[in-house]
Image: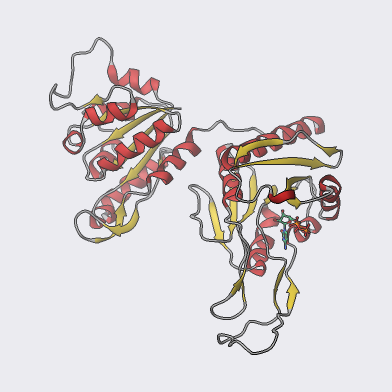
């Protein structure tokens, strides 16, 4: 992607340099545009060195408006696939919200037709000021995206909302805005389950598993990127991704009730959660003391979420699940497909310790007609993209055939 990174004058400008480097490392072409105030916090040389591209706008050594044979703001506005302003200051938000343009960055912001993303950072009182909030609301009404600031200790020493969001989150938002949409999934509501569940034994002990939820989160991201409206039901501790409605669930029962509530309104579901199949029959109110003899734990089954969603599946809804198999992979996966009324099962071969902790993974989609060409080996983010791409294409063909 060709990214124009606008950097106005705020102390968080130094983080924009880090962001420019992160984006460049991920293969994007980044051109920075500094405002006059921005150039007092960070230099064009820093940004040009990090991105390998020229830095535009204010340059204290050359004055802001350099003689140029091209109409710079129009050229740059046409060049960028995305314009991001990091850190967005009260001044930069206010200017664009009100159509003002008196330097290179603000003129680009009026001239561009590309998606625009703001990542504000400022003192809490400034951020909460009605004028700033009104400007933010106005920019959103233009279709501009915001990565809201977070709470934390600010450069001014105060604690509260106004800290620049994590640069990984800002990069994630850019990815969401700049991706190619898939017609078969565009605007569709998709439920994704991800992460481990945790079943309490007593106030300090839990039954859980080693899943982190990263594969399910990557699937949710990939669905978001192709234009789906994603509802994520998430176990574990990983952060919720940008632009995805996320409900936290701790136990299998909580995950079940969140999914049951959402499912009737969904077009489809991908169940990637590692749901604990058992829970302790009782949860001790106090910490259980160790005894002398052998000790038994009585376990009972938790609800099978996917099975329940399959049973409630209505005409037109689709349902995809996973199967971790160590033998007779395809037969077992096919059995799950039938039993849970799934449209596809992604089989993970876990024989000989494969798949756990591996950097790269392979999934074989199994549908009613049999196994399909394997996806991978790929790292989780790319595997999730391949999975969503595979399903988008298959769904597209099904829609075509129904016409
Ligand atoms: N699943 C679920 N609710 C459960 C258990 C599993 O929604 N209580 C979903 C998982 O998210 C996954 C699929 O069902 O998509 C896995 O099916 P499962 O029958 O549990 O297969 P395995 O985990 O492979 O276990 P086993 O072969 O022992 O049945």
Residue 173's x, y, as percent? 45, 41
Tell which of 321 and 363 is nearer to you: 363
Residue 49's x, y, as percent? 28, 27
Looking at the rendering, which quadrant does residue 275 occupy? bottom right
Q: Residue furthest top?
A: 69
Q: Is residue 314 above or below residue 7?
A: below
Q: Residue at point 56% right, 60% down?
A: 247
Q: Residue at point 67% right, 39% down?
A: 387
Tell which of 181 and 97 is nearer to you: 181
Q: Residue furthest bottom?
A: 292
Tell which of 315 and 348 is nearer to you: 348
Residue 238 visible here: yes
Residue 107 visible here: no
Residue 53's x, y, as percent? 32, 22
Q: Is 198 on the left or on the right of 94, as rendered?
A: right
Q: Is 89 on the left or on the right of 179, as rendered?
A: left
Q: Residue at point 82% right, 50% down?
A: 327
Q: Quadrant of ligand 1?
A: bottom right
Residue 117's x, y, as percent? 39, 38
Tell which of 259 and 289 is nearer to you: 289
- Count how many numbered circles sit on residues in the image: 0
Q: Is residue 82 above or below residue 383?
A: above
Instruction: Indicate the colouring scheme.
Output: secondary structure
Query: Looking at the figure, which quarter contains the C terminus?
Result: top right
Q: Is 14 on the left or on the right of 181, as rendered?
A: left
């Amino acid at each position: 992607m060709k990214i124009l990174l606008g950097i106005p004058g705020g102390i968080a400008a130094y983080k924009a340099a880090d962001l420019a480097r992160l984006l460049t490392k991920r293969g994007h072409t980044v051109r920075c545009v500094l405002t006059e105030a921005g150039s007092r916090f960070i230099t064009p040389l820093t940004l040009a060195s990090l991105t390998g591209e020229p830095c535009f706008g204010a340059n204290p050594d050359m004055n802001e408006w350099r003689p140029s044979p091209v109409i710079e703001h129009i050229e740059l506005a046409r060049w960028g696939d995305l314009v991001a302003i990091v850190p967005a200051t009260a001044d930069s938000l206010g200017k664009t919200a009100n159509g003002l343009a008196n330097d290179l960055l603000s003129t680009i912001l009026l001239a561009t037709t590309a998606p625009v993303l703001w990542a504000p950072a400022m003192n809490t009182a400034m951020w909460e000021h009605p004028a700033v909030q009104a400007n933010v609301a106005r920019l959103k009404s233009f279709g501009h995206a915001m990565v809201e600031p977070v709470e934390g200790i600010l450069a001014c020493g105060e604690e509260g909302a106004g800290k620049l969001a994590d640069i990984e989150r800002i990069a994630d938002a850019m990815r969401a805005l700049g991706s190619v949409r898939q017609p078969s999934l565009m605007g569709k509501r998709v439920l994704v389950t991800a992460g481990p569940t945790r079943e309490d034994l007593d106030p300090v002990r839990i039954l859980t598993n080693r899943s982190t939820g990263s594969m399910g989160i990557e699937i949710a991201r990939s669905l978001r990127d192709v234009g789906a409206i994603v509802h994520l039901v998430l176990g574990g501790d990983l952060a919720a991704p940008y632009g995805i409605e996320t409900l936290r669930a701790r136990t299998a029962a909580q995950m079940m009730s969140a999914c049951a509530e959402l499912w009737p309104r969904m077009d489809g579901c991908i169940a990637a959660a590692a749901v604990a199949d058992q829970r302790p029959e009782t949860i001790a109110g106090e910490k259980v003391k160790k005894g002398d003899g052998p000790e038994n734990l009585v376990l009972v089954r938790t609800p099978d979420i996917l099975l329940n969603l399959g049973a409630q599946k209505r005409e037109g809804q689709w349902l995809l699940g996973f199967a971790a198999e160590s033998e007779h992979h395809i037969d077992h996966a096919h059995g799950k497909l039938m039993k849970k009324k799934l449209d596809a099962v992604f089989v993970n071969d876990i024989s000989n310790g494969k798949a756990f902790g591996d950097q790269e993974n392979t999934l074989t989609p199994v549908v009613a007609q049999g196994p399909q060409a394997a996806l991978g080996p790929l790292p989780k983010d790319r595997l999730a993209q391949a999975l969503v791409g595979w399903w988008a294409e298959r769904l597209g063909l099904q829609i075509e055939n129904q016409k």
